[in-house]
Amino acid sequence: MSSVSKQPERFSREVAANKRLLALDYGLARTGMALSDKRWRVAVPLGVIHARQWGHIIEHLRPIVAEHHVGGFIVGLPLRWDGQEGEQCARTRTFAVRAHKAFDLPVLLVDERYSSSAAERLHKEGLEKKRAPLPQDSHHDARAAAWILQDALDRYKHLAGGG
């Protein structure tokens, strides 16, 4: 049975082999998305869902999850600068649980502090060479999701491959 957790080892065991990971940068107005390759090495921005209600977000995700053979979600947890959880963390956790229940896929919650500013800075400075190229027209939230995902892939590369 899959779960929502902050434990990468558990998450990697719960993701089926040869499945991609979908990162979500959940927000009140927009949710950025990024997708990994099947070997969990590279993250690319996928797009943005412009919806406020979690049910609408889930419905937007259904064809994406099916088309890209997604085996698990990486969801950025917006901790405050001091590492404490605030109101948006509670909303994000609730969304993660709903996504888990809707798709019966594991969800890994990862610290997303500074992801938006880091993604924007790298985009402006043109330093994406280490990471997947970011299209000029990719939305800020999609770039932040790619940053969150690539950071998780780099951090947990010893767990790559799922299953």
Image (tube, helix red, strand yellow):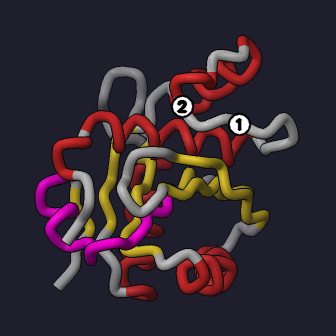
Residue 20 painted magenta = yes
Say if the magenta span includes residue 16: yes
Residue placed at 35% from the left, 43% from the top? 153
Could you tell me if the residues under marks 2 and 1 are in contact, i.e. CB atoms within 8 Å?
A: yes
Q: Is residue 106 above or below residue 131?
A: below
Within 10 Å of disc 1 (Cα), the crowding (few <14, some 14-19, many 20+) is many
Image location (x, y in percent) of residue 35:
54, 58
Observer-nearest residue: 18 or 28? 18
Q: Residue furthest right?
A: 137
Residue 17 visible in the snapshot: yes
From the top left corner, tell me how far across and down residue 47 is, in percent: 73, 57
Please tell me the numbered disc located at residue 131.
2
Residue 78 location, quadrant: top left
Q: Is residue 92 above or below residue 64?
A: above
Q: Residue at x 71, y 23 (%)?
A: 123
Say which mark, if any, is on residue 108. none
Tell me: 46 left or right of 50.
left
Residue tagged by mark 1?
134
Q: Is residue 87 visible?
A: no
- Picture layout, residue 12 above or below residue 158: below
Q: Which residue is drawn at the image coordinates 27% and 74% (left, top)?
A: 17
Magenta residue span: 7-22
